[in-house]
Amino acid sequence: MESRMQRLPGKVALITGASGGIGRGLALRFAAEGARVGVLDLQPEHCQAVVAEIQAAGGQALALPADVNREDQVEGAVARLRQAHGPIEVLVNNAAVMPSGRIHETTPLDFDRCVAVNLRGAFLCSRAVLPGMLAQRKGSIIHMASITGMIGVPGIAAYSMTKGALIALARAMSTDYARLGVRTNCVSPGTIDSPMLHAFAARQTNPDAIRRAFDEIHPIGRVGTIEEVANVFVFLASDEASFVTGANYEVDGGLSVKGEQPQDPQ
């Protein structure tokens, strides 16, 4: 796809939540780096649109419409990707939902859905790819966490809980599988200029003010870009990170060090 040296040549990568936002950015970037990408998301037409983008740029990808909360659908997607492109070497657990609300404002339905997608989905996808990775004694699993799982952020209690759990899960998996050739890590972005940020801001009383607040609060002076997040994922998926497991990479412009957050806009 590009004349420069690719960093993921020949690797087969499954990316969940890959039809939009950061997930789409990761799928496009992994393909540009030479990976054969499984684009997993709920809507078939959205998956196929990302696949078409990748193919138009000369890359290889497969649309895998599936619900990460359904074991049968996850297993089927993994089997299709393996059959089409070979053993899966990289898994990115990116699929997520972010309901707004403090605990007393969060409905049980929203809470259960958040856990189902953000945590159960990562569990099911990891469980599905691990036998193949263990058989080849090689694999990289990367959970999309968040600094919300590390520091207090107002108004997104359920989401923050699941992201903290993913950091703990990566640590547990690293101790279970590192000597068997499978590395497990997390990436914890700060505020990223993505559709999720746009949707969150749109739900607030003053979207422009909350958007400016996110820019100003980062020590670096702005929110991050999808490409900046993708840079770290490519590293962790590549052989360059062969001695990295159990880590949590904070891609946040210094926000977690500063520890300050925008005030609850409600």
Image: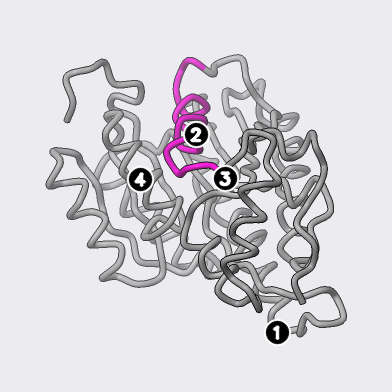
Q: Are marks 4 and 1 in contact (CB under 8 Å)?
A: no
Q: Amino acid at mark 3?
A: Val
- Residue 149 in the figure: left or right of residue 65: right
* Residue 88 drawn above or below residue 55: above
Q: Secondary structure at mark 4?
A: helix
> How far, Cα to Cα, is label 4 from label 1?
30 Å
Q: Are marks 3 and 4 in contact (CB under 8 Å)?
A: no
Mark 2–mark 1 distance (CA, rounded to whole Å): 31 Å
The residue indicated by pointer 1 is: 109
Q: Is residue 193 above or below residue 85?
A: below
**Amino acid type of disc 2?**
Phe
Residue for point 77% across, 77% down: 266
Q: Of label 3 and label 4, which has the lower sequence position?
A: 4
Q: Residue at position x 27%, y 29% from top?
A: 34
Residue 27 got which mark?
4
Residue 233 marker: 2
> Which is more N-terminal, label 1 or label 2?
1
Tell how many labels.
4
State which region is magenta.
Answer: 223-240
Q: Decide: few, some or many residues near mark 4? Use Cα within 10 Å; few <14, some 14-19, many ≥20.
A: many
Magenta span: chief secondary structure:
helix
**Left or right: 101 as drawn, with respect to 177:** right
Residue 229 belongs to the span the image colors magenta: yes
Q: In x, y percent, where is residue 77? A: 38, 58
- The label on residue 135 is none
Q: Nearer the viewer, mark 3 or mark 4?
A: 3
Is there CB contact under 8 Å for labels 3 and 1?
no
